[in-house]
Image: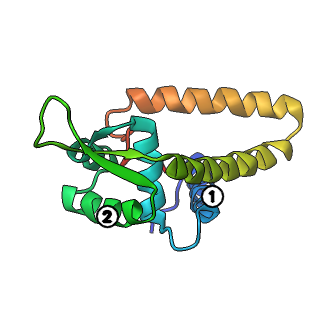
Amino acid sequence: MQALPDEVADLERLTRVLVAVAWDSAHAAPRGVTFPQVRLLVVLDSLGCTPCSRLAEAMGVNASSVTRLADKLEAHGYVARGVDEHRRTVVTVEVTPAGREVVAGVVDRRHRALAELLAELPAERRATVSTAVGDLLSAAEAAPGVPTAGPGRL
C-alpha cells in the first residue's frame, strides 16, 4: 500500500473518530433499535412526512429496505405511515413524537461527544478548527469526485 501524504492520513484518522462518534451516538436509542433503524429515523426526521421512495433515495438504499425498516419502527410506535393527499397510491412515512425522542437522544449524545472533543482544545484552536471545517465543507462542494450528500445523515 502506498504511503499517504500526512494531510490525507490525518483526515483519514479524523474520519474514523467522527464515524465512531456517530456509531456510538446510535446507542442512545432504546434497546432493540438497530443502527440502520436509527439512521432511518434521523434522515426521516430531517425530511418530515415524505414518500417512502424519497426516503429510500435520501438514504441511498432501495425501497424494500425502507419498507422493512419502517415496518419494525412502526410496530414500536416510532414512525407512522400514511398516504399522499394528492396521490393516494403513494405511501408516506413520518416520525412520531416517540420517534422524535429517539432522534433527540441520539443527536444530543453526538453533540455532547463533539463538544467534549472540542473542549480538549484551547479556545483559540477551536476557532481555527471551525474555520478549517468550513473550508473543508466548501471544498467538498466544489470537488466533483467528493460525495457531499452521501447516503443520508448519520
Position of the N terminus, as image quadrant, is: bottom left
Hey, which quadrant is residue 65 in on the image? bottom left
Q: Work out whether residue 21 or residue 71 is closer to the camera in this orientation and state it.
A: 71
Look at 73% across and 52% down and name the residue there. Answer: 113
Q: Mark number for residue 115? A: none
Q: Residue at x 71, y 34 (%)?
A: 129
Q: Secondary structure at mark 2?
A: helix
- What residue is shown at x 10% (from left), y 43% (from top)? 89
Disc 1 residue crowd, few under 14, some 14–19, many 20+, Cα 10 Å? many
Q: Amino acid at mark 2?
A: Asp
- Please report whichever mark, 1 or 2, sits nearer to the chain's N-terminal start: 1
Q: Which mark is residue 71?
A: 2
64 lies left or right of 106: left
Is residue 44 something that shows in the picture?
Answer: yes
Query: Residue 145 falls in which quadrant of the image?
Result: top left
In the image, residue 38 sits, relative to residue 151, either above or below, namely below
Residue labelled with disc 1? 25
Locate residue 108, reporting x and y percent: 68, 47
